[in-house]
Amino acid sequence: MTELWFLILYLMIAFFAVLEGWDFGAGALHYIVARNQEERRVLIAAIGPLWSWHEVWLVGTGGVLFVAFPRVLSTAFPAYYLALYLVLWTIILRGISLEFRGHISHALWRSFWDVVFSASNVTLAILFGVAIGNVIRGMPLAPDTPLSLPLFTDFGVRGKVGLLDWYTLSVAVFTLVCLSAHGASYLTMKTEGEIHRRSRELAKWLWLSAFLLLILVSLETFYVRPQLLTGMSDRLLAWGGVALVGGGLISIFTSWRSGAERGTFLGGCLLIAGLLGAAAASVYPVMLHSTIAPEYSVTALNGSSDASSLRAAAYWWPVAFALALVYFSFIGRHYRGRVQLSKDTQRPY
Amino acid sequence: MGIAWFLVGWKWLHLRTGDGRYGDAARLWARIFGINFAVGVVTGIPMEFQFGTNWAAFSQYAGGVIGQTLAMEGMFAFFLESAFIGALVWGEKRLGPKSHFVAALAVAVGSWTSGYFILVTNAFMQYPIGHSFAADGSLRIQSLSAFLLSPWALIQFGHNQVAALVTGSFAIASVGAFYVLRDATSEQGRLFLKWGAAAGLLASLLAAFPTGDAQAKMVARHQPAALAAMEGRFESGPMAEITLIGQPDVRRRTLDNPIRVPGALSFLAFGTFHRDVPGLGAFPQDAWPTNIELLYYSFHVMAGLGTIFIGLMALANLQRIRGRLESSTALLWALMLAFPFPFIANTAGWMTSELGRQPWLVYGLLRTSEGYSKAVGSGETLFTLIGFTGLYFLVGLLYLFLAGREVMQGASHD
């Protein structure tokens, strides 16, 4: 049962990263690919209709953590208190910038929200990258003392670590570049004209940089947490994740060359889901890795809810998941194809 | 949650009759709804995460039970709402009339489902049911159906949802009154007045009876100390009176300047005038709610405003039936200025519910003082509290500005 819930948690995170990832990425590129008001309206109309549906996967992830792994939630969330609040406040600003921007057709109003929008997307991509970095690096978990991390210490990865160090920051840079690339692929697929051309060109360079950074971050990871490599070697699922990453990369670059925009985009989705999958399969069952001693780690086994609670939730979760996909297919059908301002600019966009 | 069903009603009439007035009405309120929703979504996400950041001990203790409904809220309700809200607010041209009606319906169902799951969570904190204890002392689910169909949750859902309808109705009636005062021939104004007043009267009545009455009976039976504090009652005894006005003095255990109705509390809480209703003196002091004065005033503000709502809406409907509502300037002014008061009543109601539960976080099982995150210092908490106050103040100002602007521009503006 705990394996099932670990898998469900992975699915939630993967859906969030893939779906909201392209929104973050497109938002981070707001000023780079969209140079005037008209183009910025197109960019926002491309992500406007479904961003809240994407963001709900984060809420769902929180819910799954709550019901299935309450000890993980109650250990990690207070430990990263200020960082989490930074995430929450940035999410608030990003959401309202998307929704409020279009309400008033005035250059000052719009440029104010444009700044808030692109800055919050960059910040969120970095913060989520830092979060992944922290989960992989681990934290100084010890029994009987509640965990609390400072924002930063000496930026080293050993001993008294903080939220930010050279490793978590490099994961964050990778995340930002990777999501921006993903966002560029999405915009290539959804737009026309100048913004389309710029996105397509950027996608190539961003994916290339993401690929190089991925090699660098992987090497760093094996230095920071060598156990991951040994954990990975005999796990079929982890290699499945690696295969997805490889397949994604091939799809990205071959499709880009042939102009198959959907192939590039789907390749990006595969790559992100595969990376998270390889990481999840290699760390299992450890969820919060203790840098002090392995027996202090919070794992899926010692951090999960009671079996009766897990069983009860396993009845309703698949129903809810299936329904969520039904809504998406209903709405997605209507928003297929490229953004047309004539159809999508009924105020406020 | 209140406006959602007006949108469904107007979209439906527009679909059936093709009458453009309903389409315009739905479009205006969908835009306002969109602003509400944006603010609601982004401020709702922190609420879920605060269980983990600020109430870690509570989350670990009760996660196996209340995690169910919090996760269900996300998975069942938020997905439904968030998938369709974009389509409802901006997608009229993309979707066409039928799908757009479906979107309105989906958003209404989603928002009410979300309300149900969060109220089940709160009902468990008020009146724990359906749980048992795991080996480590934490809570686990014993019966999912008993937990989901808790009598407290059903009653609280009824009361909370009609209160949401009161809020929506007052907002719509208020805008209607504003339009008619501005221009006596305003068609939209008349439409909003008609719908707002009719729904407002019905919902205000339902908020008092049966839902408010049933809620009070639940409190009387399961949280007797809370009931005593809500009424400022220190001495026990039969023929218990209801306090209309008075100021509790907790130190001297008296109620100053009281105006009371004898026997009414015994009757309302237990159905007979002679029933003994315990006062706070009957309970040990560490079982008293921690802020009795605030609890007392919250309850009286809610109940007093609820009574005024019934009177105001009854008068509005009476005048409308006589065909004089549009010319009753004083009444229109009252309706126009009344829209903030349901928000105040809702807040006071929630304060009654949450202050009344103190000193418990999960009634009878976990004290509030045991539930917070031990790892988070008070300096950090204060920092984030100040941050939230500032951010929410800003968001609130922007909300009022944008919603007010939509109202000013009116329905005809596309």
Image (spheres, helix red, strand yellow):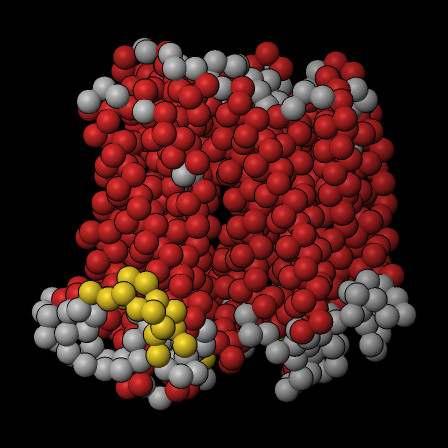
Left or right: residue A156 compared with residue B241: right
Image quarter of the N terminus of chain A: bottom left
Q: Residue at x 36, y 73 (%)?
A: B256
Residue A29 percent location from the top left of the image: 78, 33
Q: Residue at x 59, y 18 (%)?
A: A345
Task: Give the tally of numbered discs.
Answer: 0
B238 displayed left or right of A176: left
Q: Residue furthest front?
A: B257
The location of residue A109, given as percent across then percent down, is 72, 28
**Front residue of B17 and B409:** B409
User: In the rendered view, would you say B7 is above or below A194?
Assistant: below
Residue A215 x/y as whole percent: 83, 51
Residue B268 quadrant: bottom left
Q: Quadrant of residue B269?
A: bottom left
Which residue occupies 39% across, 87% down? B285
- Where residue A133 appears, as percent x and y from the top left, is 75, 60
Q: On the picture, is B306 further left or further right than A143? A: left
Asked whether the viewer can see residue A165, the reply is yes
The C terminus of chain A - image quarter: top right
